[in-house]
Image (cartoon, rainbow, N blue to C red):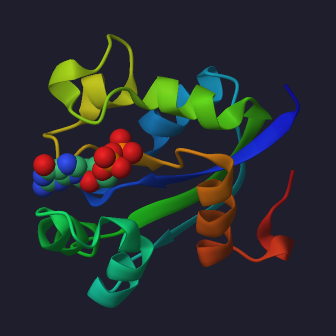
């Protein structure tokens, strides 16, 4: 498997509890390199555009309100098989189902406020990275 990049967000429930460093330690401990990172506060419209694929889901308004409720940390992670590796260290979407040692098991508050986002495929990773970062900001 070649070196791969994925997109990650540390969500508002985690920045509120000052967990950026603890989550980054988990990511780095899993062999992922943070090659870009910035803290920002999305508007509702920016969150809606990011989660466009979920527009028809019943939780869309709740999700985008939450994601624009406080600061987030947007990241690009690099490593061997980075997309799958990040999904593994994140844990299941619902923290009640997340494996021991995963970020969501340790830190998530609920299904909605689940501390991290991670791209689910190479195509979405490319789109999500480009939504937040320019090429010059990716320092591998
Ligand atoms: P992920 O790829 O593991 O983040 O999961 P999904 O792509 O299925 O969902 C995207 C995000 O929507 C999740 O990370 C949750 O924050 C949120 N979400 C999913 N299901 C629900 C739900 O039933 N209620 C609420 N409030 N949020 C949800």
Q: Which residue is at the far front?
A: 56
Image x and y of residue 118, in percent: 49, 46
The reply, left or right, for residue 76 in relation to residue 112 is right
Q: Is residue 42 above or below residue 24?
A: below
Image x and y of residue 47, in percent: 35, 77
Identify the residue shown where x is 15% and y is 74%: 61
Q: How many marks?
A: 0
Identify the residue shown where x is 18% and y is 74%: 65
Identify the residue shown where x is 62% and y is 21%: 30
Q: Nearer the viewer, residue 122 or 103?
A: 122
The reply, left or right, for residue 112 in relation to residue 53 is left
Image x and y of residue 88, in percent: 49, 24
Q: Is residue 89 above or below residue 120?
A: above
Identify the residue shown where x is 33% and y is 89%: 45
- Inspect this view and state whether residue 62 appears: yes
Q: Quadrant of residue 99?
A: top left
Q: Which residue is at the far top?
A: 100
Image x and y of residue 120, in percent: 52, 44
The reply, left or right, for residue 35 in relation to residue 1 is left
Q: Quadrant of the N terminus?
A: top right
Q: Quadrant of residue 53?
A: bottom left
- Inspect this view and state whether residue 18 appears: no
Q: Is residue 56 above or below residue 74?
A: below
Q: Nearer the viewer, residue 26 or 17?
A: 26
The reply, left or right, for residue 65 in relation to residue 86 is left
């Amino acid at each position: 498997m070649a070196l791969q990049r994925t997109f990650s967000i540390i969500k508002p429930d985690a920045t509120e509890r000052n967990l950026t460093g603890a989550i980054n330690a988990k990511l780095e401990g899993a062999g992922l390199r943070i090659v870009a990172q910035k803290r920002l506060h999305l508007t509702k419209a920016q969150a809606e555009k990011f989660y466009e694929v979920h527009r028809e889901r019943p939780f869309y308004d709740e999700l985008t309100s939450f994601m624009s409720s406080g600061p987030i940390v947007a990241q690009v992670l690099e490593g061997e098989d980075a997309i799958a590796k990040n999904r593994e260290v994140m844990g299941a979407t619902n923290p009640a189902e997340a494996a021991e040692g995963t970020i969501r098991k340790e830190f998530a508050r609920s299904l909605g406020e689940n501390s991290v986002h991670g791209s689910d495929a190479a195509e979405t990773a490319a789109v999500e990275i480009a939504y937040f970062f320019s090429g010059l900001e990716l320092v591998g």
